[in-house]
Image: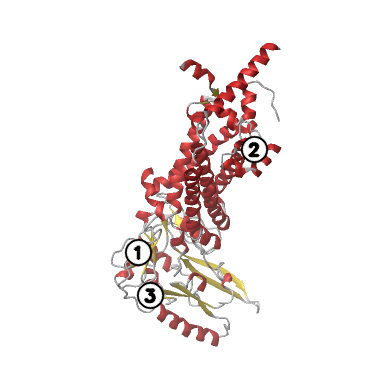
Amino acid sequence: MNDVRHTRLIQRYTPGERANHWIVAIAFVLLALSGLALFHPYFYPLTGLFGGGTWTRILHPWIGVFMFLLFLVLAIRMARHNAINRADRQWLRQFGDVINKREDRVPEVGKYNAGQKILYFALILLMIGLLLTGLVMWREYFASFFGLWLIQLASVLHAIFAFLIICAIIVHIYAGIWVKGSLRSMTRGTVTPGWAWKHHRAWFRQVRGMPSRK
Amino acid sequence: MALQSLDIKRRSATTTPMPSERDVVMGGGVAKLIDTTKCIGCKACQVACMEWNDVRDEIGTNVGVYDNPMDLTENSWTLMRFAEYENDAGDLEWLIRKDGCMHCEDPGCLKACPSPGAIVQYNNGIVDFHQENCIGCGYCITGCPFDIPRISKKDNKAYKCTLCSDRVAVGQEPACVKTCPTGAIVFGTKEDMIKHADDRIVDLKSRGFDNAGLYDPAGVGGTHVMYVLHHADQPGLYSDLPKDPTISPMVSLWKGIAKPLGVAAMALTALAGFFHYIRVGPNEVTDEDERRADEESQRQSQEATHE
């Protein structure tokens, strides 16, 4: 019986994709904690997690560069499933139905729905923005190459981008908590057929080798 | 340069009030008045600063100008800047300005600093860096309207003029004031220094410097280092002294409203998720969903075998 249940499952993420995702996720959490510590005095005690204020200042940009590179790999892996199409616009128009669990009324979704695709592109833009502004602010190696005005602009933009990306990731994490059966796709790599059929029907049919129905 | 004998008025990255019951500061705090019209460019102040503070800069190379070193560094906290200005009459004026921390009443460095207690402002107005709390991020440089702080390449800490807070604490004037041979640098209460400057300005005007005036820029709340300028209408003549310095609006945004707004945005996003879950409940896959998924799969495999 257990075997039967097991073979029913649909592979959503390979071990490589899962490892890549979680490396980025861990780096993100470290960056958010160290970045908030340097941003607001209320969060300054978080520097203790990194060995003090000076270590937080030293580590934050290196973790940032590391996350950017691994995110880039992940983004390339996911790119072909994230093209925006006409059904995505309709999905967004019916966002009210989505969040009120009336998913049966919205167009069938491929591997990713419109919300996930927007997150994908938002993360790419924010990661690039954070990398560029972060390099300008990086006093030890780069800030001396830039004028004061640009460093000031980079500093305020870095903070704004950081809050946007933290909010985006909160939404991402919540979606994983809310839509039951999603988390296992990133921890164990598989989802149940019912999950795929309910949330990503076009992808389900594609995986099952069926012609896609519009 | 921690000095417990001086009361602290403001402290970086600190959101609660400093101990403020004691209020013994008279005359608007202390101030150093630098009279550019009396300065002869001897650099004795630079030497006195090095001597008192035990800082030694690297020996540079002569590039054909009097400025030496060429810029402020972590070891050169004050510096004579020499500007050659040809006035309307076609005469050369040698405008020499002793550059260094202006000790703003509203310090941009302190506003920008993320490390609690790395930058403090004493009740007497002196802005001081406590290097033992400095984390080396360089935000003080980003926040400063006068481009003063410098990060050491040796220890990654920020350094600048302390206004000899250690000397002032025991009733002495800063080392540069003590050594100035022409009396171009004087030190006292801010009120007294403004009075002294007023006398100087009257004298300068009588000598034909109609635009002589005091440099005490209001945009940073006034400064505890002030200049008497022959051309107060054109401070830019003095090696780019800013005309109306303020804390940059971008720094004010970054270190002001962005903080509560950003934290609120994060908290509200998380709360929105929480209450959505509480109101709508989890989005679960039912047995019916699983059954219909299997149905479709079977239909598909049957069609595949028929073909």
Asked if disc 1 and disc 3 are in contact, CB closer than 8 Å, the reply is: no
Q: Are marks 1 and 2 on the same chain?
A: no
Q: Is residue A160 placed above or below B277 in the rendered structure? A: below
**Element marked by disc 3:** loop
Task: Give the residue pinned by disc 1.
Answer: B52
> Which chain contains the residue that carries disc 3?
B
**Element marked by disc 1:** helix
Which residue is rendered at x = 48% and y = 26% of the image?
A: A188
Task: Give the residue pinned by disc 3.
Answer: B29
Let me know if residue A12 appears in the view. no
Q: Amino acid at mark 3?
A: Gly
Residue A8 vs residue B115, the one in the foreground: A8
Q: Residues within 10 Å of mark 1 (few under 14, many from 20)?
A: few
Asked if disc 2 and disc 3 are in contact, CB closer than 8 Å, the reply is: no
> Which chain contains the residue that carries disc 1?
B
Q: Residues within 10 Å of mark 3 (few under 14, many from 20)?
A: some
Q: Amino acid at mark 1?
A: Trp
In the displayed structure image, the side of residue A48 where residue A67 appears, left or right: right
Residue B234 vs residue B190, the one in the foreground: B190
Residue B48 vs residue B128, the one in the foreground: B128
Q: Amino acid at mark 2?
A: Val
